[in-house]
Image (spheres, helix red, strand yellow):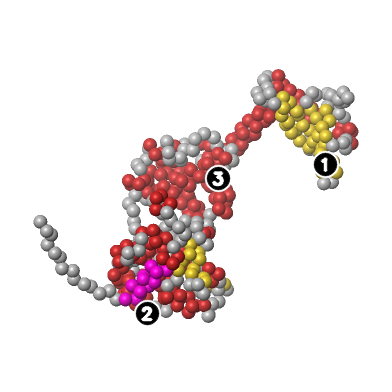
């Protein structure tokens, strides 16, 4: 049956599901589909692409938003594009891209950064990342590029933001560069800019800035020598409160500050003597089982009977119970004059040095106790399980060492044979 000309009345009255051609303009169709409240109607232009030689459909809008005469006018424009050897759908996409780029003039780097942070924040492990991203970009990027349209930012502008801090604050500068790159990548994905990312390092800024690994000065966490650990434990036990117990627990488990203050009673198995930290709270994003030695178990049991919070080491705020503050243990060490030069995280190095110098435990076992990722591929390939039993022996030995005052022995040097 030959197609008939559509009319405004026939468009509104058509209920047959399918495509109904309009004889007035070749390629224009009224599409009727099933809707919740009855038939749904829209206009569509169907054509064979002069580029791919395949049939394509271009939606022209719902009949409630567009009149038949408007649909015919758009369909005629599409036919003119076909006669010129152009694909109407490709042309539509080019126009939309151009409009988005034009809109980039209205979005500045600061605005893009705020939207990018909001979009990416659900994937971050804690809320501190939002504050860190916001603060570093506001401090080091905004003064130079914050008010500029994202499509106008180039290499020179990125360099002006980074060069003043690249040598003096290399670690901060590298993070700022990475965050600017992420924001501009987000802008490209959203259609706000095109072309290479001016904040990219490889093949770009790497040729213009000194290599960060040769510039930055590594500042290790101050670590207490392991021969002094017994004296520190004795001094620590003169302190009262949750912070002192949390710090001793941190030392005895060789755990990180965030892992300890975030520990919940659900993670503690009092019967089996283990603390299972979920992957979401671990730096390596893998679940980690910690064998609790005798003293660590004693600390946990002393808190179990009087628990008032889901946290093992709770901190109290007005009207609610929270985990212990991340700075609580550091503040306690600063109140101990002879130890104020050290930090809680440094006790992991204290434990590592002791295990390497005073025990015969394999390096793999020690690294597992510290929840480190094994970088040696051969060593990692032969890893079997998490060596919980071996690590329990290691941690019991560490507990025994912390409880015993060091005794110094004199080793007589023998002359070398010639």
Q: Position of residue 74 (x, y in %)?
A: 75, 28
Q: Quadrant of residue 353?
A: bottom left
303, 58: nearer the viewer:
303
| Span highlighted in magenta in the image | 392-404
State the predominant SS element of the stretch in magenta.
Answer: helix
Q: Position of residue 124 (x, y in %)?
A: 53, 54
What residue is pinned by disc 2?
A: 238
What residue is pinned by disc 1?
A: 34
Q: Is residue 402 highlighted in magenta?
A: yes
Mark 1: few, some, or many residues within 10 Å (few <14, many ≥20)? few
Q: Nearer the viewer, mark 2 or mark 3?
A: 2
Residue under the image location 47 percent in, 59 percent down = 385
Real-space Cα distance between discs 2 and 3? Answer: 52 Å
Mark 2: few, some, or many residues within 10 Å (few <14, many ≥20)? few
Real-space Cα distance between discs 1 and 2? Answer: 77 Å
What residue is pinned by disc 3?
A: 112
Q: Secondary structure at mark 1?
A: strand
Residue 183 to residue 98: above or below: below
Q: Quadrant of residue 223?
A: bottom left
Which corner quadrant holds the C terminus?
bottom left
Residue under the image location 55 percent in, 76 percent down = 308
């Amino acid at each position: 049956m030959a197609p008939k000309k559509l009319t405004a009345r026939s468009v509104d009255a058509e209920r047959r599901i399918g495509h109904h051609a309009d004889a007035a303009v070749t390629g224009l169709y009224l599409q009727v589909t099933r809707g919740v409240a009855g038939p749904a109607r829209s206009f569509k232009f169907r054509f064979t692409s002069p580029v791919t030689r395949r049939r394509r459909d271009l939606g022209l809008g719902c009949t409630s938003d567009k009149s038949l005469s408007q649909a015919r006018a758009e369909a005629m424009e599409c036919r003119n594009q076909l006669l010129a050897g152009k694909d109407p759908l490709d042309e539509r996409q080019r126009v939309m891209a151009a409009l988005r780029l034009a809109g980039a003039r209205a979005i500045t780097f600061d605005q893009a950064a705020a939207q990018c942070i909001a979009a990416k924040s659900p994937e971050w492990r804690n809320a501190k990342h939002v504050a860190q991203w916001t603060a570093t970009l506001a401090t080091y990027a905004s003064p130079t590029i914050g008010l500029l349209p994202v499509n106008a930012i180039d290499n020179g502008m990125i360099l002006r933001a980074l060069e003043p801090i690249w040598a003096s604050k290399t670690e901060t500068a590298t993070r700022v560069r990475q965050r600017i790159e992420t924001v501009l990548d987000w802008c490209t994905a959203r259609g706000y800019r095109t072309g290479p990312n001016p904040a990219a390092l490889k093949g770009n800024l790497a040729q213009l800035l000194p290599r960060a690994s040769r510039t930055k000065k590594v500042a290790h966490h101050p670590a207490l020598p392991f021969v002094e650990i017994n004296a520190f434990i004795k001094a620590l036990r003169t302190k009262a409160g949750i912070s002192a117990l949390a710090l001793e627990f941190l030392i005895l488990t060789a755990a990180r500050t965030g892992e300890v203050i975030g520990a919940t009673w659900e993670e503690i198995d009092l019967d089996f003597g283990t603390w299972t930290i979920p992957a979401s709270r671990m730096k390596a994003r893998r679940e980690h089982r910690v064998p609790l030695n005798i003293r660590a178990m004693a600390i946990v049991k002393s808190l179990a009977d009087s628990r008032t919070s889901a946290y093992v080491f709770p901190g109290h705020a007005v009207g609610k119970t929270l985990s212990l503050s991340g700075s609580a243990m550091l503040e306690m060490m600063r109140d101990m004059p002879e130890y104020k030069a050290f930090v809680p995280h440094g006790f992991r190095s204290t434990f590592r040095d002791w295990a390497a110098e005073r025990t015969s435990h394999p390096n793999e076992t020690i690294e597992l106790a510290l929840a480190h990722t094994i970088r040696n591929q051969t060593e990692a390939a032969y890893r079997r399980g998490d060596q919980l039993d071996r690590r329990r022996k290691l941690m019991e030995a560490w507990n025994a060492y912390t409880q015993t005052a060091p005794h110094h022995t004199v080793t007589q040097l023998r002359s070398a044979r010639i």
